[in-house]
Image (spheres, rainbow, N blue to C red):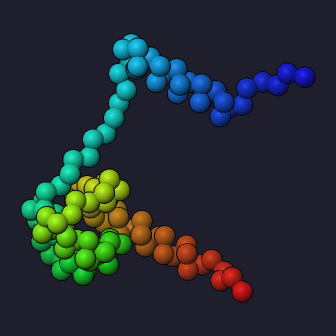
Amino acid sequence: MTMGQTRAGREVESALDEVLSHVRGKADLTCRIVDDPSADQILALRKRLKLSREKFAKRFGLNARAIQDWEQGRRVPDRAARVLLTVIAHDPDAVVRALGEQRKSLSKQPLDS
């Protein structure tokens, strides 16, 4: 009995064809590069929003100590944090809304006994 290919199977095959075309130099793939923000840029973002480290951390779900390390150049944010900082820089209210909706949905879930 022969079954047809699933939708997921077709999507995987298509994606692999796209990758092979790129490897062979026949196609360009789009990509997004998220630059490492400098310590000065992170500090400037926080200052622009007029927030202390603690308030910035609480509002955007970050660790205040990590923010301090970034601002002082001791650490560089990982990729996920760089993406979050980019979104905060462009639309901080979108992050606040998304985190607020997440908190609401979590508070509506029943607790395990």
Residue 85, percent from left and from top:
26, 60
Q: Nearer the viewer, residue 10 or 94?
A: 10
Residue 61 visible from this viewpoint: yes
Question: Image height check: is 3 above or below 69?
Answer: above
Residue 96 or residue 60, whichever sits in front: 60
The residue drawn where x is 35% and y is 21% is 28
**Horizontal and vertical percent for residue 11?**
59, 30
Drawn side of residue 7 relative to residue 64, left or right: right
Viewer-closest of 56 and 105: 56
Please identify the residue farthest to the front as the structure is shown.
74
Pick out the residue farthest to the bottom.
113
- Which residue is painted at 32% across and 78% down in the image? 58
Task: State left or right for residue 3 relative to residue 67.
Answer: right
Residue 19 % position (x, y): 46, 24
4 in relation to 75, above or below: above
Quarter of the image where the N terminus is located: top right
* Residue reaching furthest to the right: 1
Which of the 4 image quarters holds residue 60?
Answer: bottom left
Residue 77 in picture, x, y percent from top left: 26, 60
Left/right placement of residue 95 relative to residue 1 reads left
- Number of numbered discs on residues: 0
In the figure, residue 26 lies in which quadrant? top left
Is 37 placed above or below 108 here?
A: above
Residue 48 in view: no
**Which residue lies at the image location 40% right of the left edge and 20% below the top edge?**
22
Is the C terminus in the top left, top right, bottom left or bottom right quadrant?
Answer: bottom right
Q: Residue at x 37, y 26 (%)?
A: 29
